[in-house]
Image (spheres, grey):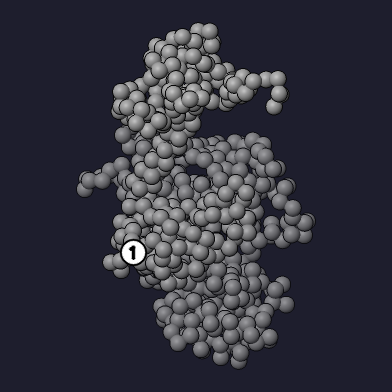
Amino acid sequence: MDQNIPKEAYSSLILQYFYDAVIVTDLKFHITSWNLAAERIYGYKAEEALGSSTIDVLKTIFLEGDREKSIAQLQANGIWQGEVFQHKKDGTKLKIRSAASFLKDKEGATIGVIAINRDITEENRIQEDLAESEERFRMSFENAGIGVCLLDLDGKFLRVNKKIQSMLGYSEVELIGRPSKEFAYKEDQNIFHQYRESALKGKDVDVVYEKRYISKSNQILWIEISNSLVKDRNGVPLYFVVHFNDITDRKNAEIHLIQAKKEAERANQAKSDFVANMSHEIRTPLNGVIGFNELLMTTNLDSDQKEYVKNAISSAHGLLGIINDILDISKIEAGKLVLNETISNLKHIIKDSLGVLQWRAKEKNIQLDFEVNPKLPEWIVVDATRLRQILINLLGNAVKFTEKGSVILKIDSEIAENEKIKLNFSIKDTGIGIPESHKPNLFQSFWQGESNSTRRFGGTGLGLRITKSLLDLMGGQIDFSSEEGKGTEFRFSIECLTLENANLSDAENENFQKDIWENINQYKLLDVSPKILIAEDNLMNRDLLNRMILKYIPKAILFEARNGVEAVRMSHELKPQLIFMDVQMPEMDGLEATTIIRKNKSNEHIPIIALTAGALYEERKKCFDVGMDHFLTKPIDILALNQVLFHYLNPTKLD
């Protein structure tokens, strides 16, 4: 300390630069000293404050008690401490922490009061915000709609909210301090610790997983859990914040849904099996009805008899069409309908489709015709059977609902992407048309425009539904326009490759064309005498197939097996040039018999033709998987049989 500066002056200088406001008053509380900090805090310059009463300058509001009590405490104890509200010059309210004591002279006489005041307004605001934040957290924690808890690093409960207590059925006292794994389902007890280790290593700090718990009432609860690891500012792990979301109802619904799905799949499989079995049972007698009637047509009949037989065959084919429709719907619904795309003659497909319906059109005296388009490709890569089915469905509907006038088929083509062409088909009729109210339902299963007992038009109501599904499978589109009483036009399109873009070698193309043309020279089979084995358990079907074969190969040597066991033995002993194998037979079915026959190397090259009343894709695939060469569906088409016989038994093959 500078010896030239009096002690009092030095002390006064220190007070001037003190951080807190230092205010000195006389005994009547008139201000006698006002330091720089007081100027900063209250906004009054020293010359403004000196001589004024603290009552006028500070406008003090006591938080506890009043001015008189505070003065009394000061007088009694010589000091007073507390927090008060005071005001700045501009009227701003401040919170002040104050300590006041008497100021004495050298003789000990009281000459005034000194107060040291600190502005704690901002500090108080921070504390209030923190308290408010903590209260909000507490309220959110306690009243959250999901369970929330804090777990220590070993997985013990540090804090639990009301929801977790309600979920598990345990009170806070019963949970705090106990490992959470004690309340978990046995198989799930270590799930938390797997995530704990990962989180402590700095991986998967925030994770979500499912875990089962056992409530106090012994109920299994499915809980969706989200873990978050909380660290301090230095990155040291402190605890886990864990959210419990009760998803028991959702999991139970999922389990029931899975069970319902399995039940539905079982029911759908049972339906498919039933449809397949019914198809087999109906096709077997139909095989006899159609086959023997077709044979009857080759005998000497008068005109009336031929007409009766034609009607019988037509009715049988109508019944077969209904069976095929139901099978197709079953396959579509099961997602098992598969396209078999091959190179096909477009003109033949059109001719076949129109041919099926020509007799019906003539009977109704309406015109059924195709507008020839010379720009159409001759050969296309398509599932010919399904395209023919689409055309027959649409042409058949047009003929059925047209009483007079015409049904006209038009086709044009245009270039599409990927070297494909787009074929646009149009079937236009002059029939009864479609009412507006019926249009939204047109492609639904089993829906018919007429459903009463007096309806004029028959049908299953499946044709358009199948047509739409087939076109969806082929990547095509269909639409229509119709005016009631004036007619309807259905339009559909498909994209396909042409023969030029099918990547066939010349040799393959030549062989293909030989097989596709229908001008099979049947007379070439008149002089051959191949050995043919027929494995069929049904006597009538054996007799029918015998007669059909002898129509084309009069000198054929035929052998009959009643089951798979006999078929295996006879194929080994007789070495036939061709085997017709029924799939469903007693003792040993055709699939097992074929498998055994193929194991014998000497029988590897004997053509085996599957005979089945089933028409599902899966059954065909099974036949080819065991080594069968071809597939004939009952009722056996006599022309299809002709093609099979010529393909495998023509003199070139037999030589």
Q: Residue at x 48, y 25 (%)?
A: 107
In the picture provided, is 373 more to the left or to the right than 159?
Answer: right
Find disc 1 in the rendering and name its residue: 174
The crowding category of the residue bearing disc 1, from other C-alpha atoms within 10 Å (few below 14, some 14 to 19, many at least 20), is: few
Count of numbered circles on the image: 1
Asked whether 395 or 172 is in front, the reply is 172
- Determine if residue 477 is in view: yes
Residue furthest to the top: 48
| 441 up-or-down from 280: above or below | above
Pick the front one: 365 or 632: 632
The residue lying at 45 percent from left, 44 percent from top is 395
Residue 366 appears in the figure: no
Q: Secondary structure at mark 1?
A: helix
In this view of the protein, which residue sits in the foreground, 9 or 204? 9
For the point 68% across and 85% down, which residue is it?
601
Residue furthest left in the image:
453
Residue 88 pos. (x, y %)? 46, 15
Q: Is residue 234 above or below residue 214?
A: above
Quadrant position of the C terminus in the picture: bottom right
Q: Is residue 89 above or below residue 280?
A: above
Q: Amino acid at mark 1?
A: Glu
Quadrant assignment, res 598: bottom right
Spot the residue most to the front: 107
Residue 350 is left or right of residue 81, and the answer is: right
Where is residue 389? Give x, y as percent: 49, 51
x, y percentage for residue 170?
Answer: 31, 62
Give the x, y percent position of residue 297.
44, 64
Q: Residue furthest right?
A: 506
Residue at 53 percent across and 79 percent down: it is 591
